[in-house]
Amino acid sequence: MTPCVSLDSFVGAIPLWLPLLGLGQARGRGPYAVPPDLVGANDIRLDLEWHLLIKYSRSFKVKIMVKFFGFVFDFWVISAISIAWCLVGTSTAIAESDKEIFVNTSLPILDRQFPIYPAEAKLTQATLSPQPENQGRQVSLNGRTFWAPWTIESMGASGGFRTWISDVSLMQITGINLLNSVNSAKQPIEWFSQVENDGLVTRLTSQYRYLDITDFAKKVGWQMSKEGNILKIITLPAQVGGIRQGQQEWGDRIVLDLDRPTSWRLNYVDKPTLIPKDTPDDPTKPTPDDPTKPNSQDKSAVADTQEWLIVVDGKLDPAWVGRTFTKGKYLKLLRVESAAGDRTYIRVNIPLGWRPMIFSLGNRDRLVIDIRPDYLVERDILWNPGIRWRSQYRNLGNARFPVFSLEVNPRQSGIKIRPILNNPPIETRTAPLLKIAADNRAIAAINSGFFNRINRLALGAIRRDNRWLSGPILNRGAIAWNDAGEMKINRLSLQETVITSKGDRLAITHLNSAYVQAGIGRYTAEWGANYTPFSDGEIIVTVDNNQVISQTPGGAADKTKFPIPKNGYLLALRSHQTAANQLAIGTNLRLETVTIPADFNRYPYILAGGPVLVQKSQVVLDPKAEGFSNAYVSQTAIRSAVGITATGNLLIVTIYNRAGGAGATFADIAQIMQQLGVVEALNFDGGSSTSLYLGGELLDRPIETAAAVHNGLGIFIK
């Protein structure tokens, strides 16, 4: 039987037949009527009467009361026969819908997004300066506070306000899905049965992209208010009335039956595991960092599952408290808990490296949780005229790799690309990319170069504003660029020579580098105010205004700080007594500096990684030529990479473990970058360092799983 309408649909039709009675136009939809504080002064207040419709329909009669220009109209409508017909038809439709969700494995879910968000009420962003009264960076949603930039705009003489929330944050704290888009001025969204295909209006600032949620909030019955620098949102109370599970060919499905749409979040439960921690990062022997393939030298047991927590802002029906659920094909554990504040906790244990895929359905509101190896939701969003955000699968043979990317047009007006470091400098020198990007006020970023995990100093080239903050090592690959939109990727070396007044030529092995070997290291003011010897027995030569002014034994490693002159540099002589004899006090010096390739010297910005993956659209992988060990070359891992497309755009990419398997090898990522259309590509530091940032949030992983990094590549909008 085909139902006439569901009860909600009948109620939603009130605005259609009410004007026929001469009573004007109404806003709202069934039991989701607009709360009183969100109804305009000229709107007809139907929220109470619509709730009465649901209440009295059980007795097969309905009393409608409408206040219109001071007059109260009341009347009875709907016969018992029509109500019964609707109820029977609706019941049939629900039964058919339930059957479909567990039988039809081709359910159209690939355009839906599962948000990833840290544990409840956990604010981990950088310390922020006070904000004006009309904006803030915290949202209280149903009593829990989250990081989410927002702003309120007065409509001026017309009265009223418009409320804007950062798009990625909105997605992550409410479960709203950001749909594919080709117009950066409008962002289509979906939340249960509410679909805004025309899109919410967007507004871009230097750090965030905001969505105007004012009208959407009215439609779904959200109450919004401001208390200080916190935006408070209260959604209509919901109830979780049922929980069902079933196995599919591809994995396991869990369905939550709701009585109305409600907000939800996916949380990573950060529990200690027995996976070996990162070890010191010798640049010739970088550490494996793939949870599916721990260090083969470690014989201890390894955790093979991970717990995730789905928080639903809805009260759990008491009948489901303490209910036992069965294991599934991949689902190791399912536990349901009733939490304070009318919340429901769904805990799942699934294979390590996987994530639950979660999406909502309307026309009887349900939340669907799928446990499957191919958990990624593909999307393609023109986020800004110069930034395109994509998440997609890329196939190599039978392997499917989840790939997150941002394509940036460096020639777009207002867009700048810069190396970013932990700022302001602190003793640890490293921080999560989330913090580094926020502190530098970047709109987007990716982690970049390698670093030593003991002293947390960079291992590779970092050049900013023509100043070498860290010099190249081991002929490693690097990307160079300028503000004209020109970019280049190649292996890079820096040759420096100190020439004495007697004509002696002394080769500098490294500039401002934490990579230590016998020879001469040079340290300038870009390194910092002081230099502390890395090895025992160094001889420290101080050069000021191109003249040697002192020569001092360095003593034991990591003990003594030597000041670096502002108009000169220090030379650290390591196992090089001959050079000490040639650098007597009073000796005048001249410095020659050459980059190889030579044209790299004309680029003010450089970041190193390695190895180089693609040149002239061809794979040119040769890790040994860049000092990488055989063991490192053979490893699989989560990866970060950067490329230059045929159109001259910058592509920053993170690649995660193949569906149901291990991470990518260098050969894998080289081929994936080829598929993405790059003509040149470079590998960046990977594993736990891998992070892709956009608009105040990480796009590719829970923030708890992202390690601290030394540097990154930042995108700025001026």
Image (spheres, rainbow, N blue to C red):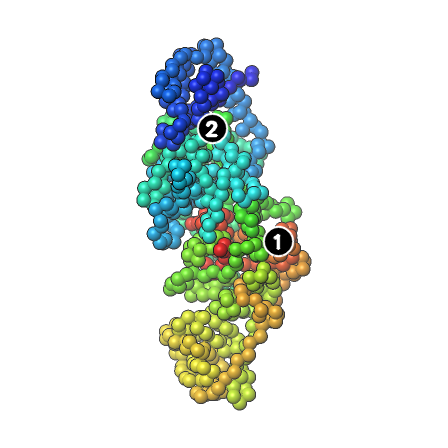
What is the x, y in percent for residue 46? 39, 23
User: Which amino acid type corresponds to the residue marked 1 in the rendered image?
Assistant: Met
Identify which residue is drawn at 57% across, 63% down: 481
Identify which residue is drawn at 40% across, 63% down: 425
Please name whichever residue, 587 or 24, is drawn nearer the observer in this view of the structure: 24
What is the x, y in percent for residue 535? 43, 74
Residue 578 appears in the rendering: no
What is the x, y in percent for residue 605? 53, 64
Q: Quadrant of residue 104?
A: top right
Q: Give the residue at the far front of this rendering.
A: 157
Up the image or down, 462 lies above or below 254; here it is below
What is the x, y in percent for residue 640? 54, 55
Identify which residue is drawn at 45% across, 61% down: 421
Specify the label residue 365 is tagged with: 2
Q: Is residue 112 left or right of residue 529?
A: right
Q: Give the residue at the far bottom of this rendering.
A: 502
Identify which residue is drawn at 58% across, 69% down: 602
Please name whichever residue, 376 or 529, is drawn nearer the observer in this view of the structure: 529
Specify the label residue 347 is tagged with: none
Q: Quadrant of residue 489?
A: bottom right
Question: How many other residues sit within 10 Å of disc 1, few (<14), some (14-19) or many (≥20)?
Answer: many
Specify the label residue 673 is tagged with: 1
Please name whichever residue, 401 or 439, is drawn nearer the observer in this view of the structure: 439
- Quarter of the picture containing the N terminus is top right
Q: Quadrant of residue 600?
A: bottom right
Up the image or down, 596 lies above or below 346; here it is below
Helix, strand or loop at disc 1?
helix
Helix, strand or loop at disc 2?
loop
Up the image or down, 269 lies above or below 281; here it is above
